[in-house]
Amino acid sequence: MTDTNLLDNRPPPRWIDGQALAARVRAELKRKVQEASERGLTPGLAVVRVGEDPASKSYVGAKVRACAEVGFHSRHISLPATTTEAELLDRIDALNRDPAIHGILVQLPLPPSIDEARVLGAIDPAKDADGFHPLNVGRLLLGLDAPVPCTPKGILRLLDEAGVDLRGKRVVVIGRSNIVGKPVALLLLARDASVAICHSKTADLPEEVRRADVIIAAVGCPALIKPDWIKPGAIIIDVGINRTAAGKLVGDVEPTCFDRATAMTPVPGGVGPMTVAMLLDNTFELFCRGLDYRSTVVEE
Ligand code: NAD
């Protein structure tokens, strides 16, 4: 690789290594968990999965393995696709009351017969490891302390790792889902970025992307973002996880966009490992705080 970028004498682009950053986060958590265990305390995470979705199985497997690595107590509850909403709510209720469990995660998507909003709303907000409970979503919107959804939290850590000062920067977020697009836009706004949120009905996506200093692609469409859309020197965070017919994992950003960027996350090895690391981080925070939002929110 040359010392400068052929486009305009900029330093060569670099990859933002999510794998390495996530390993550092896990190592730091492992140290803290050891300290807690010397006082007889162990953080506990329950991961609930319903049905046989292969991607969900693989994500849950990674989360349970990560728990073991850092020394968390983890409980993996795997329920058949025939599970009723009432049965799932009973399981959540039991976990809410279980003192060994500090964080609860229900892997999405749920089977269509189950009301996702009702299930997420049944998790004790003080054990809400994903930050998807409506109370915590509201708290995030208002800038109050709350568990931050894992993928958006990981994206912010990756931007910090890349040394990006977000203040006054134009950021485009492509995708407006409740789990990535909307919460990451709120976090970026809280860091004083000027944020545009684009989606499937955006009139001229290439033009929106061309204006951006920082691009967050969270769509689920392989190679949607093209090199000629990238402002030279932009920072690119590729959240997309798409599996090709050949079984290869690819992002939402065409890989050659890297050549025009200052820094970019790879797929795999970028946002994915950070999502899992932030789940552990959230669970550890909930373990430390033991907050009961239902009693504190009224006073604020
Ligand atoms: P989603 O399906 O809920 O939302 C997709 C969004 O993309 C929607 O808001 C939609 O309006 C928008 N969109 C669709 N087509 C578009 C187009 N042509 N132009 C512009 N916008 C378009 O998806 P999600 O759950 O937010 O996930 C998005 C992607 O991120 C998926 O590939 C998913 O697998 C991945 N993901 C990765 C991680 C991770 O840890 N790396 C975590 C969550 C999601």
Image (tube, helix red, strand yellow):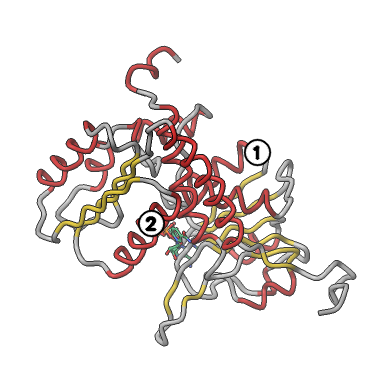
Looking at the rendering, in which quadrant would you find the N terminus? bottom right
Farthest-out residue, right: 9
* Residue type pointed to by label 2: Lys
Closer to us: 64 or 108: 64
Q: Is residue 134 left or right of residue 80?
A: right
Q: Do labels 2 and 1 touch, CB within 8 Å?
A: no
Considering depth in this image, is 225 or 256 the residue closer to the camera?
256
Q: Is mark 2 within 8 Å of ligand 1?
A: no
Crowding near the residue tagged with mark 2, few <14, some 14–19, many ≥20 C-alpha atoms within 10 Å? many
Residue sitting at x 29%, y 65%: 57
Q: Position of residue 251 (x, y in %)?
A: 52, 71
Q: Which residue is mark 1?
A: 191
Q: Name the residue: 32% across, 21% down.
A: 294
The residue located at (59%, 69%) in the rendering is 266
State the separation of the CA atoms marked 2 and 1. Answer: 28 Å
Taking the image as four quarters, which one is ligand 1 found in? bottom left
